[in-house]
Amino acid sequence: MVCQCPLDGLLNPALLGKSVIVGAPPTQRGVVCAASYEARKFGVRSAMASITAGPLCPKGVFVRPRMDAYREESRRIMEIIAGTGAIVEQMSVDEAYVDLSAFCQAEDTDASLQKALPIAQELKRRIKVERSLSATIGIAANKLLAKLASDHQKPDGLTLITEKDKVQFLRPLPVRALYGVGKVTEQVLNGAGIKSIGDLQDYRGDLRAIVGSFAGQLKSFAFGEDDRPLELGDEIKSISGEETFLQDTEDRKILRRCLMEQADDISRRLKRKQLGAHTVQVKVRYGDFTTLTRQITVEEPLTEAKEIYRLGCFLLGREKLVSRPLRLLGLGVSSLREPTGQQLSLL
């Protein structure tokens, strides 16, 4: 089962029903982080440049992201879901896979799925009553189908895909709906005359000539077969931040201040999670959208902002990354472990 909850609108009820676009305003550089269903009707999508979204949705209301508030609301909703006793794999701030098999055992798979319906209905009710949010839930026997089911009746939907109906359910959907099929793979498949999942089901040629080693898994996905388990590890692999400037800049004061703010934020998050970082990475993007990343790894774990900042500055200088004005500057850490001793002194 997949549960999805939209968080925007709760923080400001006056925005409910309006074309809300979360991200930088269209007069500034930046991208769309999320868009309400009302805004999506105008073609606004996540990752779209704000300057593009503005003309598409002239009456759109642009609001800045409030990630701390989103994370707190997400935590409360995930507590409700975890309260069922089910196994939960949280995918993002507003989406999670939920394994209810321990509570829904029956003589066959479809009977088990039917037993999940009242649990899903109760989850939707509690989220609505306790958090004033709608939840869209998809129920199926595997992750692939559960995700597709959760996308089927947004917002506030509840969709069950049974094993006996899964192949027929998939047939009219575009191949892009399948996990692992991105824009490039979609174009390659379309070029071979495979536009729908039904076309993929009926294809009798050698898929390997089209998509290589992905062929076997893709064919399985087309028939609703997916054996991917829930990934339950809660290990954080990296922490990062980045900023897109209103104007391209190579002003060292601006860049140093930006880097220091990012280092402070990363340090706070590391300490909150009681982690240290062995690798520091910088990311730059120039006015022509050329993007470069460089990283350095140290032996002792880093937690202090000043050390993370120093390594960021070191990478920018060593690699001569500020050779022209920057559109974006980012700083991140990875190879995270629990700190075991004092930090490495950096000269």
Image (tube, rainbow, N blue to C red):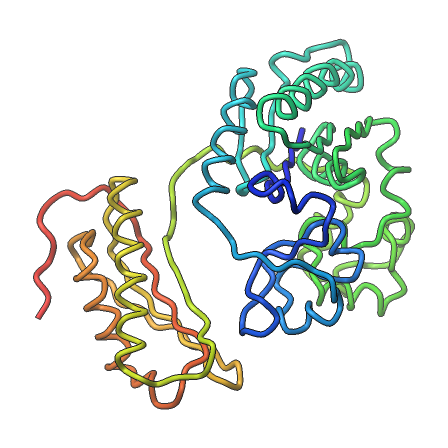
- The foreground one among 323 and 223 is 323
Q: Position of residue 309 (x, y in %)?
A: 22, 66
Q: Which residue is pictured at 31% across the width and 54% down the height?
A: 265
Q: Which residue is pictured at 24% across the width and 81% down the height?
A: 318
Q: Name the quadrant containing residue 189.
A: bottom right
Q: Which residue is pictured at 31% across the width and 47% down the height?
A: 269
Q: Residue furthest bottom?
A: 324
Is 247 rendered above or below residue 38? Answer: below
Q: Position of residue 299 (x, y in %)?
A: 17, 57
- Compared across the picture, whether 258 is left or right of 10 comes to left
Quarter occupied by the C terminus? bottom left
Is 319 rendered above or below residue 219? Answer: below
Q: Position of residue 131 (x, y in %)?
A: 58, 27
Quarter occupied by the N terminus? top right
Q: Which residue is pictured at 26% across the width and 65% down the height?
A: 260
Q: Name the quadrant containing residue 2.
A: top right
Q: Position of residue 185 (x, y in %)?
A: 72, 63
